[in-house]
Amino acid sequence: MGRWLLPDGVDPEASLLLTARGLRALGDGYMAVLLPAYLLAIGLDTLQVGIVSTATMLGSALTTLAVGAWGHRITANRLLLAAAVLMSATGLGFAGLSSFWPLLVVAFVGTLNPSSGDVSVFLPLEHARLARAARANARTALFARYSVLGALCAAFGALAAGLPDWLAHDVGVSRLSALRGMFIVYGLLGLIVFWLYRQLPVCSESQEPEAVTPLGPSRAVVLRLAGLFSVDAFAGGLVVNSLLSLWLFERFGLSLTQAGAFFFWAGLLSAASQFAAPVVAARIGLLNTMVFTHIPANLCLILAAWAPSLPTALGLLFVRSALSQMDVPTRTAFVMAVVTPPERSAAASFTSVPRSLAAALSPTLSGAWFAAGWIALPLVACGALKIAYDLALWRAMRRQRVDDL
């Protein structure tokens, strides 16, 4: 599936990673929409939905931190295989449990992703292998394809979120059973991802240390970026897709099918913007692309919080989707370009971990605001914090030297 997406100058093994990314995004796409509906259906309240979302992201952050700190002791292939097994176990665990505390444990140790982007342990592992699989002049294009494929598959996954309602209405399956079945499918996707990772070539002893060398000369810039990215991630955690779904349910009474259709079209817009990101970056630079597409997207989010009607809100959110993810491939390429090649795996982990930790804190806060009736506040706070991040990033990094692009 992923081979036709490869730009020139990229090793064929990248096609396996792109295919695995697409399958994971497919599962993440419908899980982000279904998770709040499922948790509400089994009797949890909005605060508990936020807590479970926090647990999923906090667990992913700590696992990613462990990979960054101690992953050099284990081959990348084994880490990827273990992550795929964990993905399968997560789906089966959610399908078989209905009490808050057991679900909270599974959410913490598992791979469920309630956000619009990939915040799991898979991310730094795949990024490091992709960076090594591409020559410098093809790296940005490869990361763009990686992001675009994820966004497209997540969009179709969001469209699949309407299946439980269809099964309940037209087939006669109970809605709760249909929701549980979608978690089982997520577990099966994990097994397919495991099979794909088994096909990856095993790194030679001379290659493996280069991919997992701890941070050295680039430590200062990586730590500075990690701190800035954490602000962006904390803001994004206030409006992860699961909570944006909850906002649409609570504010406008959307059904699962309608919410899935919205996230499908929003995902297509995100994919198109990410595909265009390398072209824009070639003209105005990586940093400018990251910052100056992000600011108007966040203004649209703030305006959507106060939109008087559903069409106005959706229109603003669609504009946001068309702009807000252009920083994803450019951010990854920027990080890979400002560190030395041996530090790339560690840099990917140590810039991902603060993002995941920061994002893990905010869903519970949003859940509390929802429970208190302040349903517009998460969107406003998210947009305002992200604009502050954009301005701080541009000021801190505008003179940073970027090589090998």
Image (cartoon, rainbow, N blue to C red):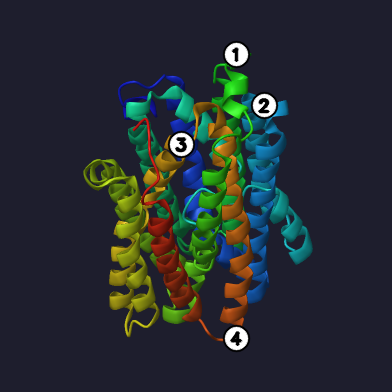
User: In the rendered structure, are the residues bearing label 3 and label 4 in contact, judged by CB atoms less than 8 Å apart?
Assistant: no
In front: 109, or 126?
126
Q: Residue furthest right?
A: 101
Q: CA distance from mark 2 to mark 1?
A: 17 Å
Q: Look at discs 1 and 4 and give the one toward the viewer.
A: 1
Cα–Cα span, label 3 and label 1: 20 Å
Q: Amino acid at mark 3?
A: Met
The kind of residue on which mark 1 rests is: Ser
Graded by Cα atoms within 10 Å as few (under 14), some (14 to 19) or many (20 or more), the crowding at tag 2 reads some
Q: CA distance from mark 2 to mark 4?
A: 45 Å
Residue that carries the numbered disc 1 in the rendered image:
206
- Tell me how far mark 3 sits from mark 4, CA to CA: 42 Å
Observer able to see residue 291? yes
Q: Which residue is mark 3?
A: 336
Above or below, 267 relative to 344: below
Between disc 3 and disc 4, whose residue precedes?
3
Q: Which residue is mark 4?
A: 372
User: Which-is-in-front pick, marks 2 and 1?
Assistant: 1
* Residue identifier under label 2: 78
